[in-house]
Image (cartoon, rainbow, N blue to C red):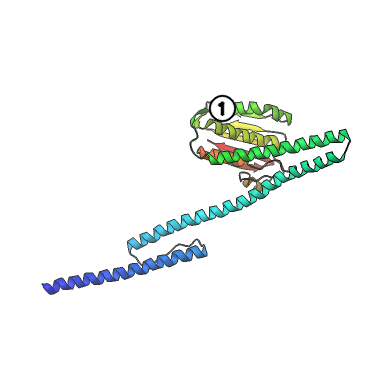
Amino acid sequence: MLYEVIGVLAAALCFCVIKLIIMKKSAKEIADGFAEKLHDDTNTTITISSYDKDMRALADSVNKQLKLLRSEHLRYDQGNTELVNAITNISHDLRTPLTAILGYLDLINKTDDEAKKEEYLGIISERAEMMKQLTEELFKYSVVISQENGEQQEEVYVNQLLEESLAGFFPALTQKGITPDINITHKRVIRTLNKSALSRIFSNLLTNAVKYSGGDLSVSLSEDGEIRFSNTAKGLSAVSVEQLFDRFYTVETARNSTGLGLSIAKTLVQRMGGSITAEYENDKLTIIIRL
């Protein structure tokens, strides 16, 4: 009887020793694999030779965390690239009118011609207004990005808010020779969201139409809450349309915009649980919002 007990204990001890050796090997494989994946920055996962369910569960857990780490690292790299591009773009956008202002101030100091001075002052005023618009756009963007939470939600009558936004932009549209084609459903479209955020989205899209439309604009709201802003926009490409919602992107070469309007609209729409996309066909750019 004693020998049987000793035999069982010896077998159990051997099992535990073997188990411990396997676990140590697996732990080393996980540690080595983790270090290798971090160093090589590949998308491959850590594999282990053991079939022990606990060690495999540990390896799976480490792989999940490694995937998250790679995702954060990629997001950081993209953010860093965007920051560099943003600084470049902002510097260019602000330096161009500032250089012009300084140049025309110098011309004013060198001339006694009152007519010329008046002309130069008009140009300076125009460039100063451009700088004001740029800084205001940047400020609005920083406010939107910083206010990720705590936005007040309420029931919003989307039809009415869209009509009010169009009415507010009607003078600017007609000044550009644009008579909007409006098709808003008679059915009440009610959504629970932040009213001021939706108003800003409409404002940004209408501002975009005023700046870049080829002379037309159609706006529609369907019964299911789909909103479409469509206008002629010649010269775009599939690549530029894909980039429209990127921060600091603009298709304009002589820029007076940071390209933040559509990016702000995208951020606000996504916070409300909606989606915003762009389509381009036959020189027609269509921004589609689904609430």
Give residue 184's position: percent from left, percent from top: 59, 28
Q: What residue lies at 25% left-to-right and 72% top-to-bottom?
A: 14
Can you say which quadrant of the picture contains the N terminus?
bottom left
Q: What residue lies at 73% left-to-right and 37% top-to-bottom?
A: 128
The answer to whether 25 is drawn above or below residue 199 in the figure is: below
The answer to whether 139 is drawn above or below residue 35 in the figure is: above
Residue type marked 1: Asn
Give residue 147's position: percent from left, percent from top: 53, 39
For this orientation, the residue located farthest to the bottom is 3
Pick the front one: 194 or 286? 194
Q: Quadrant of residue 74?
A: bottom right
For this orientation, the residue located farthest to the front is 109
SS assignment at label 1 = helix
Pick the front one: 279 or 155? 155
Give residue 288's position: percent from left, percent from top: 59, 38
Q: What residue lies at 64% left-to-right and 51% top-to-bottom?
A: 85
The residue pinned by badge 1 equals 159
